[in-house]
Amino acid sequence: MPHFLKSPRFAVVLALGAITMMSACTTTGQPPDSPSASASLSETRSGGPSRWELVRWTRADGTLRDLPHGDNGEPIVFNFSDGIDSSQGTVSGTSGCNRFTGGYGKTASGVRFDRIAGTRMACPGPRMDTETALLKAMQSPFTTVGTQPSAGSTGRQVIWKTADGELLQFVEREGVGRRGDKVDPATGSVGGTEKIVYIDSQRVECSGVGKMQCYRWRDAPDKPWQLWYGPIEGLDFESGVTYKLRVKEYQVPNPPADASAIRWQVLEVVERRRGN
């Protein structure tokens, strides 16, 4: 057998099949695994919320990682608040076992993620292993190595390469509303209620499934503090600073046992004051 047929590089390209070759045509004409391939899906809409599902995960050695789906668990889904080409926005979804939220932004060659936080529900070993690997990969930017516009019933597709050389193939799914709408961080639907909340300058120890740090919040300056167990999506919290926020509140259907049934997404930091 020729030597190149045994190489991990050849195995990765073979595993991706036709989608990778088609994707190469929508970039800059460079090979699909070129780090400088275009990061844009300008052939189709680039603004507004979008929902993407991870459908294939190819390791650097060419083997495939099993992905949760159906009876094996919820699929891995990323909800981007302003499209994958946005300079910055909010990303949320499911990471194999738990729900996550954080920030994202476009880079010169792909996409980056930051301030990723999630729930802490335990799942069967293989799902936890996949989630751990995904969250670790998200600590470094992804490089776009292939794209394909929507064709018939198939949504747009993108292939991102991780810092470890693994390939993640995502397909765009329906269910996120009109372009320019704000996406529900939990489900990808459009909706929610706006409200004003006040956040204390210090987080305190609290108990969920285990010990954790909670925000203290209230909806009026003269009301007592309450505990908030989940993340506040879009808040870059600084200890010693109190906040008055305008948020959008969403109801979460069927939340995990250790997660809140309500989610908040920051729309505006109305006031930021050091001290109490």
Image (tube, rainbow, N blue to C red):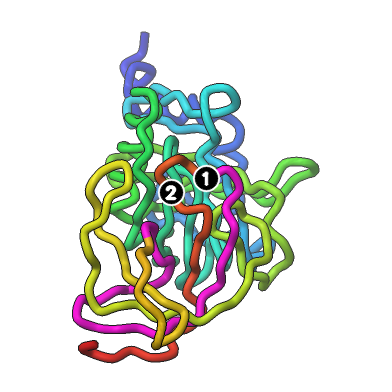
Instruction: Identify the residue at the far top of this view.
Output: 1
Q: Position of residue 147 (x, y in %)?
A: 57, 49
Q: Nearer the viewer, residue 266 or 77?
A: 266
Q: Position of residue 242 (x, y in %)?
A: 29, 84
Look at the image and tell me whether residue 112 can be seen. Answer: no
Residue 165 occupies which quadrant of the picture? top left
Extent of the magenta region: 229-255
Decide if residue 109 is on the left or right side of residue 93.
left
Label 1 neighbour load within 10 Å: few <14, some 14-19, many 20+? some
Q: In the rendered image, which residue does mark 1 sit on? A: 255
Q: Which of 223 and 110 is in front in this view?
A: 223
What amino acid does circle 2 point to? Ala
Q: Are marks 2 and 1 in contact (CB under 8 Å)?
A: yes
The number of callouts visible is: 2
Was residue 47 drawn as part of the magenta stretch in this picture? Answer: no
Query: What residue do we see at 60% from left, 26% from top?
Result: 70
Q: Mark number for residue 259? A: 2
**Quadrant for the C terminus in the image:** bottom left
